[in-house]
């Protein structure tokens, strides 16, 4: 047998063995046999590097580290469902569906608690793995994806297909990863979802390979291309192709009672499952019905995500600790006896401000109940007044800043430290600057920033970019080594290439969140343009009111801020927007659209994206503010309303004409 033939044979044997192990749950090779094949393949590939195939299982160990992930545009937008939380909302969903589809069947699936991923196969070979990103543009994480053993590198059929599913970390892998991190003095992951998200976006795929991620397939964006007629058929087809699906737990329902009983049943099984789930996904099973139901401007109408109620756990309040934010705002925090809530260990929660504490009448020593608000941030739900004993201590608001001792001032419900040079404010500002949604610098958590600040290694934002000249000093510090310093410096250098919106968010203009930062970056393209923007001009932008516009203008009037921007420019930090640029067309830009009926040559989402690219908006319902209604086949009542209000109407022909003219 030629080396090529043997390599082909070994890959087939190993691929088959993985299929039997992961999909069929029925291993046929012993570990020893598997290892022998693997080693033989590895040595053949070393000897004949030209014969190495891209679907070789030896690629699962990861490749060279990259500086950043390339952006990829999803062929079909990666949407998610609306969330619902109770029986009433389930009934509401079913009612809505039944208005269009009188006798729906639903596909019910556990809602995997990880992050969604898209896998692209060409002729049956995995060629790309991507994150969801903003749903339109994601990141290319192919090398990392290949390390996930339950993802087939080659399908059982040589077809072109995109497959969506959840990348997740099993409870077991999560505990093991945290033991590793504890041993290495690294902060532990809060829960398996964070662990999976952190692992899959590692620039060094060798780290991803060590984390033992998994993948559960649940969706094909264009099932009709494979002759598939229902979601359940999609799931069967995926399994046949070599994907792990949740075939033991996925089920069908024909009415609300069956849905409720599935949810109750799954709730019972939940604690014993090897992975976290956070609810049940309901999908209309018949793909024809799905088509008819279509999408709102944001989400599919044919499916919804029911989320299990957040777990509430009792604990005791040990302390109320005050912290200072980057605007000087003082926040009281509840520090309580650590408890597990929805899969992660928590020990503190914000108490927001003075008024909140008084309203809740919270006192040190109280029994309190905790839950996760919006899934991640712990909050105090309630003080158990009936369990209060006489040892509790009254809540006392501080009157001086806990960091610098300056007398606090009060504005409405909040207290502020008015000292602009308060170290707490500086530390917060630095922590914000490096955080994930801001400049995304890995390896500078809040505690490290605080240490560096106290050791005078970092006193201002510019100092972060000077860390590369302090290598020797850093390596000497406890918890740092060659590797972690290297990684930190790589991450700092990479942040220089961030698109403008990240920098705009990072510098902390009052009230400018990540979303508004993006709106501004997209509109002005460069920092210089934005710095020149007038108050009137800014106020005209949708999403930006008088207050925000004022904050922006004031920020750029301040000499200190101008100096910071100038310094960052000199350091080489990118000051331009790199994302998709907004285009301009008088027929679409700044106009409000509503779409009704089916457009034969284009999906509703595609139309929406197009309109948004030209800076128009698409709304769900017709009102006086609507500028144009696009009317397709079988329009709904929106058409009548548009005629009634005398709104401009575009039929298919007109739409086509406009699109052709772009
Ligand atoms: S289907 C159009 N099926 O939950 C939505 N999603 O909003 C297509 N998820 O972001 C997704 N388990 O990451 C689907 N069995 C399942 C799922 C699932 C978990 C996640 C997914 C999505 C969110 C649903």
Image (spheres, rainbow, N blue to C red):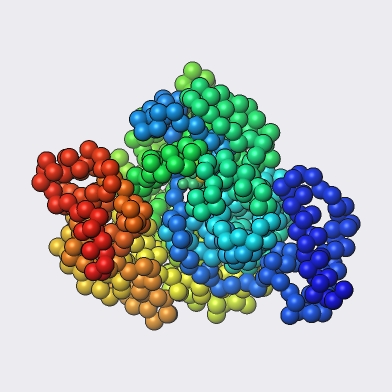
Please provide percent x and percent y for residue 54. 68, 70
Relative to 8, is 70 on the left or the right?
Answer: left
Q: Residue at x 67, y 36 (%)?
A: 248
Horizontal and vertical percent for residue 365? 53, 29
Quadrant occupied by the N terminus: bottom right
**293 relative position to 434: left or right:** left
Query: Is residue 116 shown above or below 102?
Result: below
Please state, as top left, top right, bottom left or bottom right, where the C terminus lies in the image: bottom left
Q: Quadrant of residue 529?
A: bottom left
The residue lying at 61 percent from left, 58 percent from top is 199
Foreground residue among 244 and 356:
244
Out of 370 and 142, give the one closest to the viewer: 142
Tell which of 374 and 169 is nearer to you.
169
- Regarding residue 135, the answer to whether it shows in the image is no
* In the displayed structure image, the side of residue 147 where residue 390 appears, left or right: left
* Residue at the (31%, 74%) spot, across then down: 526
Q: Residue at x 62, y 77 (%)?
A: 472
Whether residue 472 is situated above or below residue 238 in the rendered picture: below
Identity of the residue furthest to the top in this view: 386
Give the left or right position of residue 448, taking residue 325 as reference: right
Relative to 339, say whether 144 is above or below.
below
Any part of residue 66 in sight: yes
Q: Position of residue 59 (x, y in %)?
A: 71, 67
The number of discs equals: 0
Q: Position of residue 37 (x, y in %)?
A: 85, 63
């Amino acid at each position: 047998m030629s080396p090529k033939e043997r390599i082909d044979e070994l890959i087939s044997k190993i691929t088959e063995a993985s299929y039997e192990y992961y999909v069929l749950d029925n291993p046929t090779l012993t570990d020893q046999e598997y290892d022998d094949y693997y080693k033989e393949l590895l040595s053949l590939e070393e000897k004949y590097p030209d014969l190495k195939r891209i679907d070789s299982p030896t690629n699962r160990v990861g490749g060279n580290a990259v500086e950043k992930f390339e952006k990829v545009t999803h062929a079909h937008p990666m949407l998610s469902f609306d969330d619902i939380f109770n029986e009433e909302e389930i009934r509401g969903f079913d009612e809505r569906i039944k208005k269009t589809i009188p006798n729906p069947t639903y596909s019910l699936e556990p809602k995997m608690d990880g992050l969604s991923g898209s896998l692209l196969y060409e002729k049956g070979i995995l060629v790309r793995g991507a994150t969801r990103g903003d749903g339109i543009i994601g990141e290319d994480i192919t090398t990392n994806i290949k390390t996930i053993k339950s993802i087939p590198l080659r399908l059982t059929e040589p077809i072109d297909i995109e497959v969506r599913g959840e990348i997740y970390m099993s409870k077991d892998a999560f505990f093991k990863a945290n033991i590793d991190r504890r041993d290495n003095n690294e902060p532990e992951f809060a829960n398996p979802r964070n662990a999976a998200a952190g692992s899959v976006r590692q620039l060094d795929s060798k780290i991803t390979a060590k984390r033992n991620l998994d993948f559960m397939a649940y969706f094909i964006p264009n099932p009709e291309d494979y002759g598939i007629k229902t979601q359940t058929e999609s799931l069967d087809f995926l399994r046949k192709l070599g994907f792990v699906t949740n075939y033991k737990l996925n089920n069908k329902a024909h009415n609300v009672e069956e849905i409720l009983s599935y949810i109750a049943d799954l709730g019972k099984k939940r604690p014993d499952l090897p992975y976290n789930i956070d609810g049940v996904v309901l999908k209309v099973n018949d793909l024809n019905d799905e088509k008819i139901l279509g999408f709102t401007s944001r989400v599919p109408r044919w499916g919804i995500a029911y989320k299990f109620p957040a777990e509430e756990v009792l604990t005791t309040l040990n302390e109320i600790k005050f912290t200072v934010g980057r605007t000087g705002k003082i926040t009281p925090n509840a520090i309580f006896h650590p408890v597990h809530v929805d899969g992660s260990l928590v020990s503190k929660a914000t108490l927001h401000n003075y008024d909140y504490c008084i309203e809740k009448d919270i006192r040190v020593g109280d029994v309190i109940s905790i839950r996760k608000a919006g899934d991640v941030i712990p909050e105090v739900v309630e003080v158990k007044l009936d369990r209060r004993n006489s040892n509790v201590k009254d809540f006392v608001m501080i009157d001086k800043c806990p960091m610098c001792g300056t007398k606090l001032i009060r504005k409405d419900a909040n207290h502020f430290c008015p000292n602009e040079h308060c170290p707490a404010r500086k530390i917060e500002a630095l922590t914000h600057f490096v955080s994930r949604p801001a400049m995304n610098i890995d390896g500078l958590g809040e505690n490290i920033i605080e240490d560096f600040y106290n050791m005078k290694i970092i006193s201002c934002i510019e100092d972060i970019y000077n860390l590369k000249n302090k290598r020797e000093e850093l390596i000497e510090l406890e918890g740092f080594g060659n590797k972690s310093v290297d990684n930190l410096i790589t991450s700092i250098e990479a942040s220089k290439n961030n698109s403008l919106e990240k920098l705009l968010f990072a510098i902390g203009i009052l009230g400018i969140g990540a979303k508004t930062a993006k709106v501004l970056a997209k509109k002005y393209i460069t920092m210089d343009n934005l710095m020149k923007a007038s108050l009137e001009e800014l106020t005209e932008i949708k999403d930006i009111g008088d207050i925000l516009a004022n904050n922006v203008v004031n920020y750029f009037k301040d000499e200190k801020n101008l100096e910071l921007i100038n310094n960052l420019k000199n350091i080489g930090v990118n000051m331009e927007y790199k994302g998709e640029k907004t285009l301009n067309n008088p027929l679409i830009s700044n106009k409000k659209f509503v779409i009704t009926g089916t457009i034969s040559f284009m999906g509703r989402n595609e139309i929406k994206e197009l309109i948004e690219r030209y800076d128009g908006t698409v709304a769900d319902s017709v009102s006086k503010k609507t500028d144009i209604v696009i009317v397709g086949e079988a329009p709904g009542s929106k058409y009548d309303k548009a005629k009634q209000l005398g709104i401009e109407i575009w039929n298919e022909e007109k739409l086509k004409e406009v699109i052709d003219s772009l």
